[in-house]
Image: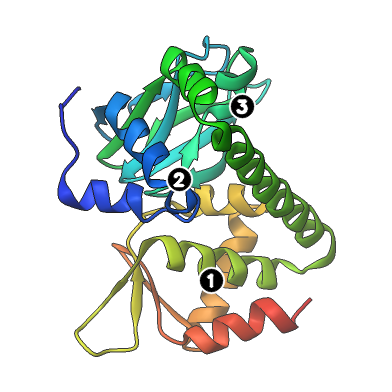
Amino acid sequence: MDAPLLTVEERNAINGGRWFSSLSPSLRHDIFRCAYVRRYVDGQRIVARGDAPEEWLACASGAVRISSTSVSGRQITLTYMEPGSWFGDVATFDGDERTHDAYAHGATTVFCVSRKDFQQLLATHAEFAEALIRLHARRTRNLFRLIEDLNTLPLRARLAKQLRYLLRAYGTSVSLGGTEVRISLQLAQEELAQLLGASRQRVNQELKALERENVIRIEPGGLVIRDIDALVSIGEFEG
């Protein structure tokens, strides 16, 4: 479903992205000038593995679930792209096929730049290629950290670190002036388990333990973080 313009909140999310905000005003202007908007309903596929790389994309609102499919046909969630994050540039840059599926998680708005315009931006702005290298370097660092965590940290610590990430991206205050923060991105425990490379049963056990310790509260609408400092300590010192 297409719509011609971003809302104020969506535009702010794109402009406020850590990587995008580092670009020069002229490059940001030209990206906005050639980009267009697409809106998706929950569960709608945005791109499929094997697709031709026709667009460079950014999440403007909602969330984009990046996944792969196992040999048995089971979908495995790898990560979520939060508002302000860009994706699809690897295939757009090298022209090879998409490596993963992307689905809307909740009502989601995607900001799109065609491959033709992407290449024109590379030709027009010398800084764009260097900026993309910085973006890829940051992703590589994050990937190495993830691999290190999988091999060195217990599940409890990995869960705490994942909840902290979700809190930064999707945290909303429960009440004015309160210390509790709700993770607004609603994830099934199976999806959370896939992000952690663990079974749903083990993740459920760790969530229940954190709830007993008053670190989190499990609600039908999602998780509420009750003690952020405790969550930080678990992720940092229980390796």
Say few, some or many: other residues with alpha carbon within 10 Å of mark 3 (under 14 / 14 to 19 / 20 or more): some
- Quadrant placement of the N terminus: top left
User: Which is nearer the eye, 202 or 36?
Assistant: 36
- Quadrant placement of the C terminus: bottom right
User: Which is nearer the eye, 156 or 143?
Assistant: 143
Ranked by sequence position, the earlier of labels 2 and 3 is 2
Q: Secondary structure at mark 3?
A: helix
Residue 32 visible in rendering: yes
Q: Amino acid at mark 1?
A: Leu
For disc 3, the marked residue is 90
Residue 43 visible in rendering: no
Q: Is residue 22 left or right of residue 108?
A: right
Any mark on residue 85, and which? 2
Q: CA distance from mark 2 to mark 3?
A: 14 Å
In this view, the residue farthest toward the top is 52
Q: Amino acid at mark 2?
A: Ser
For disc 1, the marked residue is 207
